[in-house]
Image (tube, helix red, strand yellow):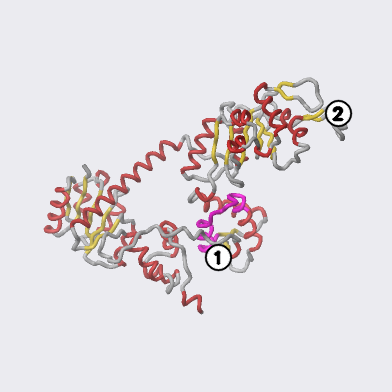
Amino acid sequence: MSHILIVEDEAIIRTALRKLLERHRYKISEAGSVREATTKYRLADMDLIISDLRLPGAPGTDLLKLAGDVPVLIMTSYASLRSAVDSMRMGAADYIAKPFDHDEMLATVRRVIGKAEQNRAAGAAAADSKAEGRAISGMIGDSPVMRDLYARIHKVAPTDATVLVHGETGTGKELVARAIHEESKRNGKPLISVNCAAIPETLIEAELFGHEKGAFTGAQTAREGLIAAADGGTLFLDEIGELPLEAQARLLRVLQEGEVRPIGAIESRKVNVRLVAATHRNLRQLAAEHKFREDLYYRINVVQMTLPPLRERGKDVLTIAENLLEKFCAKVNRSILRLSPEAIQAITTYTWPGNVRELENAIQRAVILTEDNVEIDHRTLDIDLDLVPIEEADPERRPRTSLRADPREDLSLEDYFARFVLEHQETMSETELAKKLGVSRKCLWERRQKLGIPRKKAKRLAEA
């Protein structure tokens, strides 16, 4: 049973609200002021606090700081957008205008308590998985999909299991291979990385397996192959789907028998190599089409890891962009740069088909092309949208907020905020919008990001 504290100085309203909530199986406590609430009760024990905005002694919004993680629902007779935004800016869970409809109040209470419970559950789950999903050096991101990947790397790395890493081009498959090697017992031995697509088909076998002197035209000396060079360590074969069938057969013997025979040699030599393979292709389908050995596919597909594309990594995109920005500024020894709000909007809504590699190129290009002509706080410069050479945002992404025609209907604070922005963004600048809403430009931008409302230039500004 959820425990709700009602803080209301008008006894009639307080009693009516208590009876309403008790009929719906809520445990209720009452107070007539902020001081009475804090002296009589331990606010942290509540599941929800419903408080009037105007109270004797101190306003109900003072409870926002005192309540900690307990959600506070603000009631007010002054049904204005400014009151709603002020409460939201200070941290209210939601806002409701008096006189309120009983069904409206019950729906709001259920929604706020339900959301708080979900947040607590998510926090507990994140805490439980924090140790397993701890970040890996060289890899940036804290999204759920990345934490799952970190956890799997931590589990698999100490073993000698063969790993198949699948992911789109530019997602960082070599970083995964390096992380597996560094966390394994082989980290004192070499990690040999080979891009199978970058070596001509006629040379790939000689590069991997080595050759004896005179084994073929041009083999003037014997040469050790890359597999033998990785003995005791890890061999990373990127784009293994491009490996010719003949080389696949030789690789299968390495995995099955633990030995390698150079081209032209009579005897084989034992090798102890752990294989990490990577591809962006569907190897199962290639095997069905007889373009990849089926027996090799099953041999390398012991543990499979999938690297998520950048478009599925949420806020990681901006974190990676800011890290790359700092890196390239230091590399070219120039002023610290920051992304403008327009550039941030574009970066976080673009689908990035080239993934991290494409983002890296875009940021590097922007750092090189940005002029030192507008100084911000004498330390930073804005990178404008036109210097981040990406396509327009995905047109299928739409604001997630559901709006209704009547402001007295079951609208949350986010609904109020989204309604006002969508109705006025074409006639007001960002500064004017922020001023009318009673928030800073930064707060306005953060709310746009949360609600998925892309920024539009004011028509009157565009026409000027």
Task: Name the residue: 58% across, 66% down.
Answer: 375
Q: Which residue is mark 2?
A: 213
Q: Residues within 10 Å of mark 2 (few under 14, many from 20)?
A: some
Mark number displayed over residue 376 = 1
Q: Is residue 356 magenta?
A: yes
**258 up-or-down from 113: above or below:** above
- The residue that appears at 59% across and 65% down in the rendered structure is 386
Q: Nearer the viewer, residue 414 or 140?
A: 414
- Please report the residue visible at 69 percent of the width from the left and 31 percent of the height from the top: 248
| Near-viewer residue (239 or 381) | 239
Instruction: Give the residue at x 51% y 58%.
Output: 394
Q: Position of residue 110 (x, y in %)?
A: 25, 50
Residue 353 location (% of width, % of height): 58, 52
On whether residue 20 falls in the magenta region, the answer is: no
Out of 50 and 252, give the one closest to the viewer.
Answer: 252
Tell me the distance, in whole angstroms, between the alpha carbons under discs 1 and 2: 64 Å
Q: Is residue 397 left or right of residue 197?
A: left
Q: Secondary structure at mark 2?
A: loop
- Horizontally, residue 366 falls left or right of residue 150, namely right
Callout 1 amino acid: Ile
Task: Please name the amino acid that badge 2 sits on.
Answer: Lys
Check residue 173 in the rendering and tell me which mark sits there, or answer none: none
Provide the residue span drawn in magenta. Answer: 339-360
Image quadrant in which you'd find residue 229: top right
